[in-house]
Image: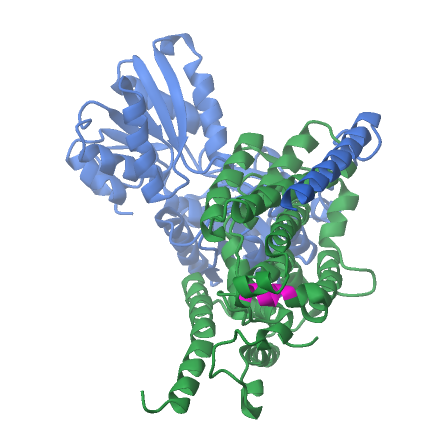
Amino acid sequence: MAPDTASDIPVRPAGEARGGLGRFLRWDVLVTALLIAVFLAGSAGSDGFATIDNLSFALGDLGEIALIALAMTMLVVAAEVDLSVASVLGLSSALIGALWDGGWAIEAIIPLVVVVGMVCGLINGLLVTRLGLPSLAVTIGTLALYRGLAYVVLGDKAVAEFPANYVSLAVDDVPGTPIPYPVALFAVLAVITGIVLHATGFGRSLFAIGAQEEAAFFAGIRVKRIKLLLFVLSGTVAAFAGVVFTLRYGSARADNGMGIELAVIAAVLLGGVDFDGGKGTLGGVIAGVLLIGLLRNLLMLNDVATEIQSIVTGLLLIISVLTPRLAAIVRQRRRAPAL
Amino acid sequence: MVISIARRFASTVAVTSLLALGLAACGGGTTKDSASSSAAPAPAESAAASANPNAPLKEGLKLAFLPKQINNPYETIVDNAGIEAAKEFKGEAKEVGPSDASASSQISYINTLIQQNQDAILIAANDANAVCGPLKQAMAKGIKIVSYDSDAAKDCRDIFINQASSEEVGRSQVKLLAEMIDYKGEIAILSATANATNQNTWIEFMKDELAKPEYKDMKLVKVAYGDDDDQKSFQETQGLLQAYPNLKGIISPTTVGISAAARYISGSKYKGEITLTGLGTPNQMRQFIKDGTVQKFALWNPKDLGYLAAYAAAALASGQITGAEGETFKAGKLGERTIGKDGEVILGPPFTFDSGNIDQFDF
């Protein structure tokens, strides 16, 4: 994958040109190194960590977050964000529950809820692109709205007992491998997203939009259209993640996935994507997702208290946002000592 | 251009929806009625395994308590009592758990406990079905499962320690309130999360009790949910009292709910007007009993609950019992207990606390 090609366009603030050493100090490379370090430390220090069972479970447990992170990466690169993803997941889960309970066929339910997710994304996208509202505000609103709808649809019920063959698809490993189906699907989608983001004109236009929207517009990029598409994509993926989530836990509920938007955004930022847009790599995000998941798994295996787990994840996130900024400041100081 | 994209999108939506509807209408595909359910029958080996009532409790058993969430004062009391009990039979017990009580948050902990080769997992399930898959994996590896406080689906655990029969809890709460408000007036329930298995069962029995003729002048106007969150419960209480000016009584069958509700009422103009009761712990409720906000509330002894759960887990892991109806085991100072229908062991009847006896309790 070509690393953030488009971020080298002239809109980049002066003083951030990379030297030879800077390439190795890129945050996504550091995260990957940290991921490897955590893995090695875990394998050496904890009995149950590097077992096929445990890793397979830990990967499967990240499935929905990882899937949603793919679409979120593209949005954040284009300097937008979708906070409503977990609520779309919940709405999708509630709909699955209500329709399944109502005697619908699962083969009909799944495409239908995915379409509902598309519509949710379309609403976000239209509010942002047509009315020019900030996506942070719009999606905080729809976060509450979609979750509310989920409760309207299913109330406080929990619907269970989904067909075994579909549950297997969400839980079981691809035959002959320790990789759960959702993770395999994620891997395929990740490759596609990686190619789209880093090796196509469309991907480059996302970086251009994120770096400087106006310049991108005058360069002939259909900014609004692309953003609308990204929101639709985000809603669609979130609804599909709702299908996976519901089948994996075998329980459809309106409160499913509550709060995972924060885990997704944490992973995206930890992976080195700039929240202001225009910078980042998908590889970094994938490393970020894995780092959060494996670190949590390792801490749990060692009976580290839940509070400490949150503190560790929180600090890691702050460091990930802070380090590149500090590095930039240091570089700038060096260039302009007269200041 | 955005409009054109929206239009094209709308037609895609329409086509896909029609397709979905068509599939459903044709009756093709897998529906609730046609599907072989994912809830597989209980593993036969556990039922077939034979119990040896005379087997001694093994030493060094590893027990793990997995509460709905950590830092919930009530669950902490239960789990600590269980951890203490384990010392009596020279076992090692610990408490691990998520910081939020959502359906899915216990799953990764179950996986971790499997990897750690625990002898038994004691769980207060946040969702009876969501924890099922991983619990079955644990059972397949020979780990014994005891649910307490809030049950998991029957085929996903060996034994459920029921804090009190649900029926008794539900009915006695209504009776307790009715006696204090002379069987008259509007009442409300302030529950925990809308999905909590135990809460909903109790509420069903409360409604059933209220249907009896002696309660004809009492009317349940609202079931509110405070999500076992102090602030939310506080706000829900405030909301109830504003929305229903004629409200005479509130039942809050959750320790978080009743103490938040008492705190709101004690500082409001409703103090003395509204009768609050429910399930609470003496230490949380002491000040509200003393200042007259609350006259009576009930609870079982959570220490005994944790204690009994620990002994049941040890008896299972030592092969004394398998979880079948009619088997008995010795639970330390609580004496001999018998396993009832569906693998349930009942702790005992709820206990009423008031200003006369509250100072005898410290938990």
Q: Is residue B145 left or right of residue B247?
A: right
Identify which residue, B148 or A231, lies in the foreground: A231
The mark total stands at: 0
Task: Determine the image quadrant of residue B181.
Answer: top left
| Magenta part, dominant SS | helix
Q: Is residue B266 left or right of residue A192?
A: left
Q: Position of residue A138 (x, y in %)?
A: 48, 46
The relative height of residue B131 versus residue A274 in the rendered view (above or below) is above
Q: Position of residue A77 (x, y in %)?
A: 57, 64
Q: Position of residue B304 (x, y in %)?
A: 40, 45
Identify which residue, B127 or A130, lies in the foreground: A130
The relative height of residue A9 versus residue B162 in the rendered view (above or below) is below
**Residue sitting at x 38%, y 49%:** B72
Task: Determine the image quadrant of residue B184.
Answer: top left
- Letter of the chain shown blue in the rendering: B
> Magenta includes A261?
no
**Residue sitting at x 71%, y 43%:** B42
The relative height of residue A86 versus residue B261 in the rendered view (above or below) is below
Can residue B352 be seen here? no
Please provide the residue range marked out in magenta: A205-210
**Residue sitting at x 52%, y 54%:** A261
- Letter of the chain shown green in the rendering: A
> In the current view of this chain or complex, which residue is farthest to the front?
A218
> In the current view of this chain or complex, which residue is farthest to the left?
B291
